[in-house]
Amino acid sequence: MIIVTKISDVRTQVAAWKAEGLTVGLVPTMGYLHEGHASLVDKAVSMCDRVVVSDFVNPTQFGPGEDLESYPRDFERDCALLEEHGCHMVFHPEVSEMYAPDACTYVEILSDMPKKLCGKTRPIHFRGVCTVVSKLFNIVMPDRAFFGQKDAQQLAIIRRMVRDMSYGIEIIGCPIVREADGLAKSSRNTYLNAEERKAALILSKAVFLGQRMVSEGEKDAKKIVNAMTDLIQSEPLAKIDYVSAVNGTTMEDVLKIEEGTLVAMAVYIGKTRLIDNFTVGTDGFSMGEGRQ
Ligand code: AMP
């Protein structure tokens, strides 16, 4: 596995691979890797000849007062995990390599899509995500890029950006990886103390409740959102940012549950903001009678 910090070195190596006729996959991450990230790398290794993982805490996607400074970092441990999973190159640039001091060009979706859900409390977040992912696409020029459904709004936004900007890169969405007790794996779980870690289970419990209602035939989005909201509110340490049922492609609110509906939430557990979701028709859950 090669560790690269300079954009020019990524370009040289990828050009050499492409000259050999090899396909290249990209897995963008912010590091502090866990089994969720590893599942993306595994998928990339299974679909591409060479896999590049970027490990970069991107400052442009953090708003003022968010956790940019305290975001967990452990590059050595990340490298060990990546090597184990068959990654070929880790791209680990300094902020100064990615952004000139006077950088002022952004990639931004101008519809309401990035203003919904997480965008309500994180107004510049998706502009930062689109900008850094665009830069990574331009640097690596992958055939495919891999993103988790854990960040369902991000995945939908990247798909839209790739379509609108004609990137010609295949975007592969990968299922949410959970801890044994249900909590969605996240680098931010490390912020939780023991009591909060227990309380955080309320997110996945709400997801499972919503999925069960859908699989039992409930089609009224409001009923599902209300039931999930009530459950989350029963946990004293939880403070809801949002629980919403939206069209999984456009992020527009929906009244009726259908295939492709995204039911998503962001919940503060103490000071830590956690997200979780499910999409109807994926993750083994469908509408109607019983699970499939
Ligand atoms: P991050 O490092 O948090 O920016 O995440 C990098 C990528 O890993 C994103 O595409 C995330 O959606 C994905 N990811 C993070 N956590 C999980 C998880 N628990 N399951 C699946 N994918 C995940």
Image (tube, rainbow, N blue to C red):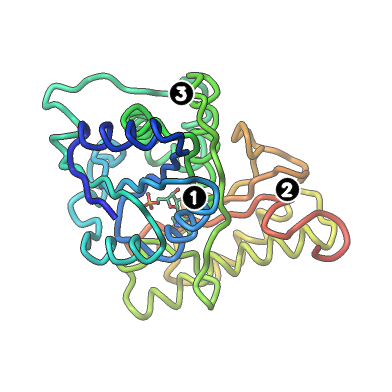
Residue drawn 54% across the image and 32% down it: 159
Q: Nearer the viewer, mark 2 or mark 3?
A: 3
Q: Residue furthest front?
A: 20
Q: Residue at x 76, y 44 (%)?
A: 259
Give the percent coordinates (x, y) of residue 115.
47, 32
Residue designated by label 1: 44
- Could you tell me which secondary element the residue under label 3 belongs to? loop
- Three-letter amino acid code at disc 3? Ile
Callout 3 touching callout 1 (CB < 8 Å): no
Q: CA distance from mark 2 to mark 3?
A: 27 Å
Q: Horizontally, is 155 left or right of 2 in the view? A: right
Distance from label 3 to label 1 (Cα)? 26 Å
Say which quarter of the image contains residue 269: bottom left
Upstream in sequence: badge 2 or badge 3: 3
Relative horizontal placement of residue 129, taking residue 150 as reference (left or right)? left
Q: Residue at x 31, y 49 (%)?
A: 89
> Dot 2, crowdedness within 10 Å: few (<14), some or many (≥20)?
many
Q: Position of residue 74 (x, y in %)?
A: 22, 63
The quadrant of the image that shows the C terminus is bottom right
Q: Which residue is mark 2?
A: 221
Q: Residue at 13%, 35% (x, y): give it.
A: 96
Q: Neighbour class for label 3 at 10 Å: few (<14), some, many (≥20)? A: some
Q: Amino acid at mark 1?
A: Ala
- Image coordinates of residue 210 in percent, x first then y, are 69, 60
Task: Residue under label 3, please give it.
Answer: 109
Examine the rendering and report whether any part of residue 275 can be seen: yes
Q: Is residue 125 visible?
A: no
Labels 3 and 1: the sequence-earlier one? 1
